[in-house]
Image (cartoon, rainbow, N blue to C red):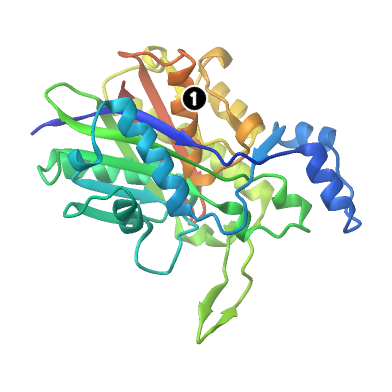
């Protein structure tokens, strides 16, 4: 059985940057008071990238995929599997992955979406890893991509300040030496109500609430406990200790959540990758965006062991331990 290794990363962020001050001015037009200080103190977010109306998830996913292929030194035609993690697909169907495949100008390999909200990239990475290890693929694109601005209520200060748009991608390849060392996926459907976008289109009209809604305190408590336990278990599964982990790359939801998890896992602050201040919460894109940023700036190097974690609506969570 082959192993699976990450051989390239890439990302794409829409060029339009919305600062906290910009957002405060926008909300003020609707009589809603907020400020850069209010947002920073509660979240750690300074700005977010927002896609222009009409820009689709498949378009930004393709941009990230092309960057990852370039980094890996591969052509699109080398890819025989595409897994896209997203909660904001272009359509009900076809899948965003099939649209990305078409935009890359290839065909034949498997292409499908994974929907696990902010855990989506960890779910997609684990799925692609299993397919490669089973011999069903040799080189895969795993992409987390979101246009979350399309499902936000821009008059709800408790949610609209938290999220941004973007896409991150990795290229996986079958390898004779370990890359992905251990994985774990979990879910608790009884907690579906604490983070959801419960509307849908049926019979030609929107049914239910089309916007993202969240119980922030419940999410905070659940996320910290779930990811702490998951991180400990996946590192132990690989036969390592937390001291042997070079980098923690958690889902970029809230700096308070990230700090709590880091302390509970006994990971020093300087070993935690944080891009939240620049990207906000990009849901399924947050982990691959952070991984790519840390590789590009020289923090994450070849041979480093990285613990990647996601937690999101469903409620879903999981961890992947990989040697880069």
Depicted 31 relative to depicted 229: above or below: below
Residue 249 shows in the view: no
Depicted 168 relative to depicted 107: above or below: above
Could you tell me residue 130's position as x and y percent?
Answer: 20, 42
Residue 134 shows in the view: yes
What residue is drawn where x is 71% and y is 51%? Answer: 160
* Residue occupied by mark 1: 293
Q: Is residue 225 left or right of residue 234?
A: right
What residue is drawn where x is 40% and y is 32%? Answer: 10
Nearest the viewer among 236 and 206 is 206
What residue is drawn where x is 18% and y is 38%? Answer: 78
Q: Is residue 214 left or right of residue 167?
A: right
Quarter of the C terminus within the rendering: top left
Q: Is residue 250 left or right of residue 176?
A: right
Provide the secondary structure element on which disc 1 rests.
helix
Could you tell me residue 177's position as x and y percent?
Answer: 15, 21
What residue is drawn where x is 63% and y is 49%? Answer: 218
Could you tell me residue 106's position as x and y percent?
Answer: 23, 50
Label 1, residues with CA under 10 Å away: few <14, some 14-19, many ≥20: many
What residue occupies the far bottom of the structure in this picture? 203
């Amino acid at each position: 059985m082959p192993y699976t290794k990450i051989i390239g990363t890439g990302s794409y962020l829409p060029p339009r940057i919305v600062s906290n001050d910009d957002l405060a001015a926008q909300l003020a037009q609707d009589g809603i008071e907020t400020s850069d200080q209010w947002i920073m103190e509660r979240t750690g977010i300074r700005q977010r990238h927002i896609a222009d109306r009409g820009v689709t998830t498949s378009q930004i996913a393709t941009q990230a995929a092309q960057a990852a292929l370039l980094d890996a030194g591969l052509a699109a035609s080398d890819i025989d599997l595409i897994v896209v993690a997203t909660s904001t697909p272009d359509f009900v169907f076809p899948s965003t992955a099939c649209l990305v495949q078409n935009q890359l100008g290839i065909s034949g390999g498997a292409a499908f979406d994974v929907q696990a909200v902010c855990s989506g990239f960890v779910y997609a990475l684990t799925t692609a890893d299993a397919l490669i290890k089973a011999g069903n693929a040799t080189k895969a694109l795993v992409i987390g991509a979101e246009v979350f601005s399309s499902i936000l209520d821009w008059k709800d200060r408790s949610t609209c300040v938290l999220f941004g748009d973007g896409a991150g991608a990795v290229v996986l390849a079958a390898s004779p030496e370990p890359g992905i060392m251990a994985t774990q996926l979990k879910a608790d459907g009884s907690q579906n109500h604490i983070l959801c976008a419960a509307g849908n289109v049926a019979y030609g009209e929107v049914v239910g609430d089309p916007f993202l809604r969240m119980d922030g305190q419940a999410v905070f408590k659940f996320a910290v406990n779930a990811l702490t336990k998951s991180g400990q278990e996946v590192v132990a599964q690989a036969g390592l200790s937390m001291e042997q982990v070079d980098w923690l790359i958690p889902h970029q939801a809230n700096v308070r959540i990230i700090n709590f998890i880091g302390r509970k896992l006994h990971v020093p602050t300087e070993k935690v990758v944080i891009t939240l201040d620049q990207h906000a919460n990009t849901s399924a894109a947050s982990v691959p965006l952070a991984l790519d940023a840390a590789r590009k700036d020289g923090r994450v190097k070849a041979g480093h062991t990285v613990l990647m974690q996601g937690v999101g609506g469903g409620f879903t969570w999981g961890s992947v331990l990989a040697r880069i």
